[in-house]
Amino acid sequence: MSNLRDSLADRFGAEEGSPPVEWAIAEGLTDYEQAVAFMEARADAIAEGRARELVWLVEHPPLYTAGTSANESDLVEPGRFPVHKTGRGGQYTYHGPGQRVAYVLLDLKRRQPDLRRYVSALEAWLIATLDAFNIRGERREERVGVWVRRPDKGEAVEDKIAAIGIRVRRWVTFHGISLNVEPDLSHFSGIVPCGVTQYGVTSLVNLGIPVTMPEVDSVLKRSFEEIFGPAERVSAPLLQGN
């Protein structure tokens, strides 16, 4: 119950009278550069009042992204997968099949123009989602993201199960979170994930939870609504070439 109490304390709802957040799920694998271009255009439209807030769930083909704090030395295998430099905060991350990426485009002026509280709300969303699968996700003050203890590997061992990387323009957020459902964990070895060397990565399936992506998506939506308010399912965006 403590995880649920934490998530409720981090509620980040919109002002009264705001329409539901649009909730879209992309089929197949989404091209990363096209996704970024769409997010930037959509963030501008939200800021100008021409579009509703959006959570867009995707999977990408295998790739690495370099945030604004990325160190070149943390790219261990430069030629393994494409590397995309991105304007989000953070360091190197991996995206690929079996990992649920949620791009979160919210207008903080309708909520709370407080980036620290926004990141806390994202963490609470992930923790509540994991709690539904009987996984205890935890925050760490010195490490962004969500972590799980691994007593099966040793008393002090922790693995990262979810990452957070955001960008904000005119108080509209984009980029967002990634949750490891069933990715190929060996793909993370080509980078130092988020610049952290002393911890590993894990996934729901790696932790022994035989779950499908649609099941995870359903829980993500329910947990999102507990913290951010109502969300309404809509068709996925049509990208160039689709």
Image (cartoon, grey):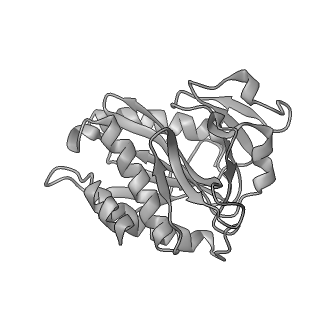
Residue at horizontal 64 percent and vertical 60 percent from the top = 155
Q: Is residue 54 visible?
A: no
Residue at horizontal 76 percent and vertical 30 percent from the top = 75
In the picture, the quarter occupied by the N terminus is bottom left
In the foreground, 70 or 87: 70
**Apparent side of residue 135 relative to residue 48 in the rendered image (left or right):** right
Residue 107 place in picture, x, y as percent = 29, 41
**Apparent side of residue 133 relative to residue 106 in the rendered image (left or right):** right
Looking at the picture, does residue 45 appear above or below residue 127? above
Residue at horizontal 61 percent and vertical 31 percent from the top = 91
**Apparent side of residue 11 relative to residue 100 in the rendered image (left or right):** left
Looking at the picture, does residue 5 appear above or below residue 236? below
In the foreground, 120 or 97: 120
In the foreground, 214 or 27: 214
Residue at horizontal 65 percent and vertical 33 percent from the top = 195
Q: How many marks?
A: 0
Residue 76 place in picture, x, y as percent = 81, 32
**Apparent side of residue 15 relative to residue 37 in the rendered image (left or right):** left
- The quadrant where residue 241 appears: top right
Residue 50 place in picture, x, y as percent = 30, 39
